[in-house]
Amino acid sequence: MDATRSQPHVNGGVATEAINEAALAVAKAWQILTKAGEEEAAAVIMAAGEKAFDAHVFGEAVVQAVAEA
């Protein structure tokens, strides 16, 4: 478990885990669109992820999505 996932949050970390999983889902969508050559759609997804989630959390999600691809 990385440092982000171990940080305390409401509900004993349940909300933090939900945020991390949602960020990963958005990052995976970005990865799929990027691989498919859908640059405009991928850029929209990337911008949304950066806006919706803490930069550190979303950055780690992108790294994980790329590693899992």
Image (spheres, rainbow, N blue to C red):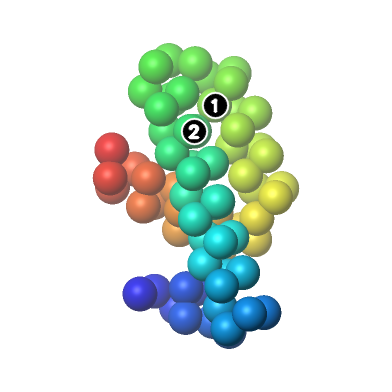
The residue lying at 59 percent from left, 60 percent from top is 19
Residue occupying the far left of the picture: 68
Q: Secondary structure at mark 1?
A: helix
Q: In the figure, residue 40 lies in which quadrant?
A: top right
The disc labelled 2 sits on which kind of residue? Trp
Image position, residue 23 (x, y; %): 54, 51
Picture disc at residue 5: none
Q: Residue 55 versus residue 9: which sits nearer the camera?
A: 9
Q: Which residue is mark 1?
A: 42
Image position, residue 8 (x, y; %): 58, 84
Vertical side of 57 occupied by 29: above or below = above
Picture disc at residue 30: 2
Q: Would you say 9 lies left or right of 62 here?
A: right
Instruction: Classify the position of the C terminus by image quarter.
Output: top left
Vertical side of 14 occupied by 19: above or below = above
Q: Secondary structure at mark 2?
A: helix
Image position, residue 68 (x, y; %): 28, 45
The disc labelled 1 sits on which kind of residue? Ala
